Image (cartoon, rainbow, N blue to C red):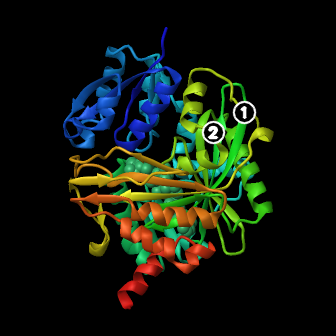
Amino acid sequence: MQNKVLIANRGEIALRIIRACKELGIATVAVYSKADKDSLHVKFADEAICIGNSRSNDSYLNMNRVISAALSTGCNAIHPGYGFLSENERFVSIVEKCGLKFVGPTSEVIAKLGNKAAARAIAKLARLPIVEGSDGVVDSLEEGLAISNKIGYPIMIKASNGGGGKGITIVYSETEFRKTFGKTMMEAKAAFGDSRVYIEKYIENPKHIEVQILGDNFGNVVQLGERDCSMQRNNQKVIEESPCVSLNPLVRRSMGFAAVRLAKAVKYTNAGTVEFIVDKDGKFYFIEMNTRIQVEHPVTEAVTGIDLVKEQLNIAFGSELSMRQYGIKTNGHSIECRINAEDVQNNFRPSPGTIKNLVFPGGNGIRIDSHIYSGYEVPPFYDSMLAKLIVHAPTRKEAIRKMRMALEQFIVDGIITNVDFLYVIMHNPEFVKGNYNTSFIKKVLEEQNNG
Ligand code: ADP
Ligand code: ADP
Ligand code: MG
């Protein structure tokens, strides 16, 4: 029987998955909302099913419709992409109960790691350093105050079920804590349907470094090196690169071991990412594990030559990993820019609309993962990411030069994008030196506003 995968996502990641399936001879079924009827993932899949209205809640987040679409088209697997239902334990357990393969870890593993507060405890058991903070979820203001006063301000209140950089509040004092604790819980409830929060010490100006891992159903786990995702705005990634230039090789080694240790501790299967923050002294701390493919996976693909989505599919269909740790070598340097439909001048406000004319750069070492085309209407309902521009070159310096050239030739008419902003960052002397942390963009914007 031919394998057939339903892709429970939209945009560039749906296309990315369709491409991998085609290369592997796997049949594909796309699902789409009314707003996405003219999307490329609908055109490029073998079959496509409309699953509802434009709002995510009525379509991409509607579990029954997604699963019915898979069953009625004879699929034997579902690939969730990132966001939407990808880390939803209930969804994954229904998928399993329906006898479908889920292209990701088991619902049991997601249950363990999905709640970020609980994941900290598991990481600690697996001997990973964690940021000082609460033991699990914090239920009351009093409990939260006691913990925060003990570890000392600033602290962060974080939604246990949060993601995408949302549901995180920095708190500088006890007074502020009293004001924001309840509010953060309410925001978490509204954004993630779960009001639970936990507390972490706020590490000042850290780097965000994450390790990509792959595990199969035979107990093999490998790590594919790190990505530096410190270039963030409001805790959301903007530019990612691999390898991290400023990482001490000994720290890199122990982070890699730590990531594999955590994966083995929970019998992790499929692709996953262990996220760490690294403080100014080079000490690293586990923050969370993303139990799915990530937006920035192409930079790892560039330097390792491994197709992560094909590996995900092969693992899900029962194959053993096609590589061993000693066989994984990295080559050169890769950088990714997230091209978003947003107005940098107006506080990065989303700017949907119709793309009148579109020109993509090309050439050696350039990759674009994108679902947009000339005449495409960017809907206002979803994430504002239009494209990922990825470059690969022998050295970081060459990769930066290539990225500058590619951004110059990345032309989107009709809507406002952040291309110029990315271009400016590629010329920032501190970025060029590799000297940046998670507060870099904030600082750059403040300097611009003052000068
Ligand atoms: P990555 O970790 O792969 O860099 P992001 O954090 O940028 O991914 O998230 C990718 C997409 O998934 C974004 O659209 C983001 O809003 C969404 N997302 C991630 N986690 C969650 C979550 N827990 N709930 C809802 N949306 C999420
Ligand atoms: P999400 O699930 O939204 O991805 P994370 O826990 O991964 O949330 O945190 C997102 C970002 O917020 C991190 O990449 C980092 O920049 C920042 N951050 C998270 N925890 C801390 C912390 N304890 N101290 C300082 N910054 C943090
Ligand atoms: Mg994260």
Q: Is residue 375 above or below residue 181?
A: above
Residue at x 21% of width, y 32% of height: 52
Expressed as whole percent of the image width and height from the top left, the position of residue 222 reads 71, 39
Expressed as whole percent of the image width and height from the top left, the position of residue 351 reads 24, 61
Labels 2 & 1 near each other (Cβ < 8 A)? yes
Q: Secondary structure at mark 1?
A: loop
Rendered-image quadrant of the C terminus: bottom left
Side of 157 where 84 appears, left or right: left
Q: Of residues 377 and 219, which is closer to you in this image?
A: 377
Q: Is residue 406 above or below residue 152?
A: above
> CA–CA distance between discs 2 and 1?
9 Å
Q: Most extreme residue toward the bottom, as rendered? A: 451
Q: Which mark is residue 139?
A: none
Residue at x 78% of width, y 61% of height: 249
Expressed as whole percent of the image width and height from the top left, the position of residue 189 reads 34, 52
**Residue 201 visible to the viewer:** no
Crowding around mark 2 (Cα neighbors within 10 Å: few <14, some 14 to 19, many 20+) is some
Residue at x 67% of width, y 41% of height: 263
What's the residue type where badge 2 is placed?
Ile
**Residue 193 visible to the viewer:** yes
Q: Secondary structure at mark 2?
A: loop
Query: Which residue is denoted by mark 1 in the rendering?
Result: 323
Q: Is residue 62 above or below residue 255?
A: above
Query: Which residue is denoted by mark 2 in the rendering?
Result: 306
Q: Of residues 175 and 399, which is closer to you in this image?
A: 399
Q: Of residues 393 and 78, which is closer to you in this image?
A: 393
**Earlier sequence position, callout 2 versus callout 1:** 2
Side of 54 where 383 appears, left or right: right
Expressed as whole percent of the image width and height from the top left, the position of residue 44 reads 34, 30
Q: Using the rendered view, name the quadrant where residue 204 is placed.
A: bottom right
What's the residue type where badge 1 is placed?
Met
Q: Most extreme residue toward the front, as rendered? A: 363
